[in-house]
Structure formats: structure tokens, C-alpha cells
Amino acid sequence: MTAPTSGNELTPRELVAELDKYIIGQGDAKRKVAIALRNRWRRQQLPDDLRDEVAPKNIIMIGPTGVGKTEIARRLARLVNAPFIKVEASKFTEVGYVGRDCESMIRELTDAAIQIVRVEMEASLADAAKAAAERRLLELLLPPQPRPPRGPYRPDDPEAGDEGPPVSPGADAEARTREILGQRLREGRLEDREIEIETRDSSNTSMMQVFSNTGLEEMGINMQEMFGKLLPQRTKRRRVKVSEARRILEEEELQNMIDMDAVVREAIRRTENAGIVFLDEIDKIAGRGSGHGPDVSREGVQRDILPIVEGSNVTTKYGVVRTDHILFVAAGAFHMTSVSDLIPELQGRFPIRVELASLEQDDFERILREPENSLIRQYAALLATEGITLEFTDDAVTALARICQQVNTESENIGARRLHTIMECLLEEALFDGPELETRTLVIDAAEVERRLSGITERHDLSRYIL
């Protein structure tokens, strides 16, 4: 399990090109994160004595909401299949106060890595698990016949030898029957036949999950593993169809084949060397606490985050995880505070700073047209499930972008998120009446956009329709 994760060999230019498929503009931010990611790959190629000396260059993104800060980090992590989590700095509290412990972000990151590695291992073992499940199904459909008892050793009978009597002729017939049954099973001709199988009882697992949510995992205690060793494994018999039995048996065989020790070792390695923590809303903990009231632990949270970003050992339920080479990407609007309001030690741990620009009308037009996951494509796909073809004219896209820009200017600027609300309002009738619509093709032009959205562009009506 030490193969490099997919995408690690992408050059910074190729990484930016991939990001351009989903995120419009913000070229400076894309370049910065692409370089940071490529530097991690470069570090892995260094000799061991130098590798540990190269620290990650953490990034802090500054810009209003809805301009792509989170999406850049999330898409980048997907490209290289790296462990990634997004956490809000405002959810953490200083040690001694009620709230989330700052170290929990590393525990969540390790959980994400466990999931990635486990999925990869399951994919590599899928064929073996399928074959093993098929053998068990055959045994359930055609239990092996007991062999006749061996006769006494007779040295005067050369055919008997020391293995008892020769195999009965019925064994050949049983083997042929098993082969025919296996062929029918693989062809799916026995899917509706009912059989009785023995499965694991999940009641123990449910109790383990209840105990695991009591906060003990914050201390790095794996309650599920502890109870798994203490409580006996119970089973129960069920009567199900072959199709359902195949799924159950494949899952059981897959779980039996997975080496969790190997999964944990690889997951910790990836967490330490490839993990990415996106620390959102960091501006909410900027500023110096007043010593009382809701701001009492702002500076304390910064000081608790500092050693994690600097590099420390965090105890998780899978073992100790070092944070020295985890990449931290912080982000915040900083419209009421500035980066300089953070404590100097924390500022120094984010040497790369990039400001993201507010989106304009041209950006909104490109967001509606260009990305592979654009809103127009999403709504067209949703209505296509009802057999309706949705089309937008060029002037309709321009009108939507103009209205989005106008609303953002006249009220709170929430960036591209405004498009979601406007599109939902525009297509509300089509989405509601879709199953009964006689017209199978809907063409949205500028006139239709103006008709549907003209009311909400009035300043005094904004709060009634737009978030």
C-alpha cells in the first residue's frame, strides 16, 4: 500500500488546468496551491536526511464568501486523492472551555485517510472476495456429501493403499453437478432462489457506536476495537434470495481479507505526508480577547492551533500522528479584521498569502457556461429525468449574470452562491410542474428571465426572495 496516490505527478500547470474545469478565475490562488502541492511531491523525492527538514508552506486565502476558496482546496485534494477535511475555526474553543478540541481536526483527517485507504484496498480485493463468496454460495446450494468411512489398512489390497477405499463413483457426479450449478450461478440464473445463510449479529456493533460517540475518541481511545475484543462475535440465521446472499457474503469476505493493521499504517503515512486541512473562518478568531464575554477564548484558540500547525504529535484512536508535514490552508473574508490581528506566531506559520477577487458579471457568465458542473448543466440533467429538455439562450445567461451582479451589489455579496438562489427562483415552476408538463422542451431566453426575476431585483423586495 505504498504506491503513490493518483495525480501526484501532475505539474503545477496541469493542476491549474484541472482546477480551471470547475473554478472560474482566481488564477493567483490556483497557482499558489498548485506550487504548494507540487512541492510536497518534490519533498518525497529528496534523501531521507533532507526530507524532514523541508516544511510545508501553508497558505492563507483572503477574500469574500462565495469566490471559490473552499472549492480550490477541495478540488485539489481530489485530484491527488489526498486526505482532506474542512473545519471551521469558529467551532473550536480554548482548552478548559466547552467546545471542540483543536486536535480533533487531526483525528478527523486521519479518519478521512482511513476511509481512502480502505476503499482502495477493497477495490484491489474485490475479485478475490467475489470468488470466495461464490464458493460459499455453492456450498449453501449444494452442500458437500459426506465421504464413506475409510476401511482398515490392508497391505494385500494394492487399490486401497493407506488412504482407505477408492473414491466412490458418486464423487464424479457431484463434481459435475457442482460445475453446472456454478455456471448457472455465474450466469445469474439462480438469483431468485432462496437459501439460508448465517450472518454476523450487528447488535454489538450498534452498542459500540453508542459508546464511541461519548467523547472518549477525543482521548484517542478506540472503543469499537476494545468492545470487539471483549464481546463474543454472535451470529444469526437468515433466509434470503441468492442475489442478497451474494452481496452479504461478498461484504463478509471483503472484511475478512482486509488487513486493518496495513490500512492504519498506510493511512497514518498519508495523513502525515499528504494530508490537507482547510481551516475556514479563521478571521472569526482574529483579534485579541477582551477577557470576558464571547470573545474570551479567541486568542486562546489561536494558541491551541499554533502547535498543531507548527508540528506536534496528536494521539488518535489509530495511533500517534505527527503534524509536521500536513498542509494547512486557512481562509477568511477578513472584512472586519485583518491578518495582522492574528497572533504573530500564527501569522508566521502561513507564509503564503493570496487575495481572491470579488466576482463580476463576466465571471458569473463564465460560471454558468464553462465549468463541467455548471448550474445550467445540473438543472438540465435534473429535468432530463422527467423527459424534459432544458435550454438557455446566450442572452438569458447574460441576463442571469447581470441580475446576480446587481443583487450582490445592492445587498450582501455572497459571490457565486447567489446563482443558486436565482436559478432556483427562475426554474421553480418547471421544477414543480415537471411531471405534468406537456411541453417537453423548455427554452429560457432573456425575456423569460426578466419576467420571472424582475420582481426580486427591486431593492425593497430583496429580503423576501434572496438569501
Image: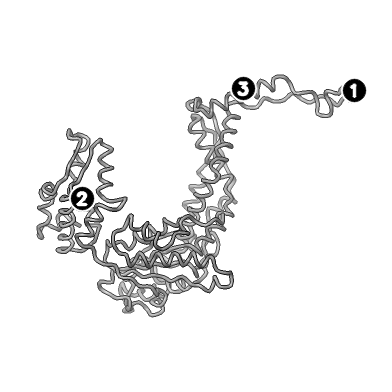
For the residue carrying disc 1, how many other residues have a C-alpha within 10 Å: few (<14), some (14-19), or many (20+)?
A: few
Whether tag 2 and tag 3 are in contact, CB under 8 A, the answer is: no
Residue 443 locus on image (x, y percent): 17, 42
Local secondary structure at mark 3: helix
Q: Amino acid at mark 3?
A: Thr
Q: Residue at x 54, y 61 (%)?
A: 269
The image shows residue 243, relative to residue 328, as above or below, that is above
Query: Which amino acid type corresponds to the residue marked 1 in the rendered image?
Result: Asp
User: On residue 171, which mark appears?
Assistant: none
Query: Residue under circle 1?
Result: 156
From mark 2 to mark 3, how far is it between C-alphas?
Answer: 61 Å
Q: Residue at x 40, y 73 (%)?
A: 350
Residue 408 appears anywhere in the view: yes
Q: Secondary structure at mark 2?
A: helix
Distance in Å between CA atoms under marks 3 and 1:
35 Å
Residue at which label 2 appears: 423
Image quadrant for the C terminus? bottom left
Q: Which residue is mark 3?
A: 177
Task: Identify the secondary structure beneath mark 1.
Answer: loop
How far from the left and from the top, in percent, is residue 352?
38, 73
